[in-house]
Amino acid sequence: MLPPLKVRNKLFEWGEKTYLVGVLNITPDSFSDGGLYLNPAKALRRAEELIAAGVDIIDIGGESTRPFAKPVPVEEELKRVVPVVEAIRKACDIPISIDTYKAKVAEEALAAGADIINDVSALRFDPAMAKVAAKANVPVILMHMKGNPQTMQVNPEYEDVLEEIALFFEERINFAEKSGIKREKLIIDPGIGFGKRFEDNLKIIKHVDFFKRLRLPVMLGPSRKSFLGQILGKEAPERDAGTMAVVAYAALKNVDLVRVHNVAMANDVLRVMEAIKGVR
């Protein structure tokens, strides 16, 4: 059993349930909800909706990391996310993660009231990020990505996708610990859709419990991703039902966290799955 993690007033008891991470993109170009919450007042209303729907963590991002997305300057990213973090923190005590690979953005978001760093680069893109995380003593989500958002979907190849991701995590975990980040503060995310082929995404989901061997909490982020579009023939906003199939499967596999756009629907799915799993 993994040690529990206290974030603000919330205790995450790993292995007891699957927790919900709600997406709040403060961007004009995210693949699913770009442009909807650029206004801080609208973002706060969305955060309140996520809380009412049963979210456990609100994940705030100010730069799209969809395939081929262009990087956003640090000052622009700060202008997008910091007022939203401040507004949510003034309104409530919900745990907030900042979805960024930039140390300056993470540092200022934490100062504004964020609690967790969610780094799609697993501390690789900004040499200062590990130092910021260690100094703040906050949880860090390490995500696997092959390449970067501009290159990750240009013919990604693996001989053994599960083993290669696990080896990547072993190296990143070692780096994080040597940088002063406590192991019990780390969470891993195999990075659905980040430098993965269609079949890679399905294999990662099917065998997601493979990563339990690393003895860290595992997060899965399937929400509205393009592999679902390939299966269903539907655009991003219409992929919630497909997303929920993955959420239900993740619950069966005892995944610790799922990152989704439609928190209300995912919460219903998880409540039913917990009731079924609870029957002897």
Image (spheres, rainbow, N blue to C red):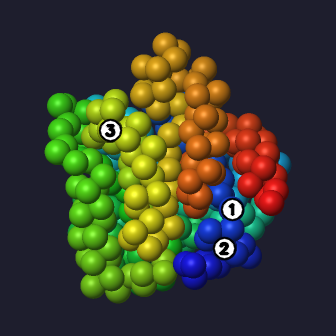
Give the residue pinned by disc 3: 200
Q: In the picture, residue 268 is in which quadrant? A: top right
User: Cβ–Cβ below 8 Å for labels 2 and 1?
Assistant: yes
* Residue at 68 percent of width and 62 percent of height: 17
Instruction: Check the image and report above or below for 162 versus 166.
Output: above
Q: Earlier in the sequence, mark 1 or mark 3?
A: 1
Under circle 3, the secondary element is helix
Give the residue pinned by disc 2: 13
Say which of 88 and 193 sits in front: 193
Where is the N terminus found, in terms of image quarters? bottom right
Residue 265: % across, % down: 74, 37
Query: How busy is the neighbourhood of tag 2: few (under 14 within 10 Å), some, or many (20 plus)?
Result: some
Inter-mark Cα distance, 2 to 3: 29 Å
Residue 123: % across, % down: 31, 65
Q: In the picture, residue 239 is in which quadrant? A: top right
Say which of 71 and 76 sits in front: 71
Residue 68: % across, % down: 28, 31
Q: Does the rendering let one see residue 50?
A: no
Under circle 1, the secondary element is loop
Instruction: Check the image and report above or below for 184 versus 95.
Output: below
Residue farthest top in this picture: 233
Disc 3 marks which amino acid?
Answer: Asp
Query: How busy is the neighbourhood of tag 3: few (under 14 within 10 Å), some, or many (20 plus)?
Result: many
Q: Is residue 175 left or right of residue 218?
A: left
Q: In the picture, residue 198 is in which quadrant? A: top left
Q: Earlier in the sequence, mark 2 or mark 3?
A: 2
Q: Is residue 140 left or right of residue 259?
A: left
* Residue at 33 percent of width and 47 percent of height: 73
Disc 1 marks which amino acid?
Answer: Lys
Instruction: Check the image and report above or below for 34 versus 14.
Output: above
Inter-mark Cα distance, 2 to 1: 8 Å
Give the residue pinned by disc 1: 17
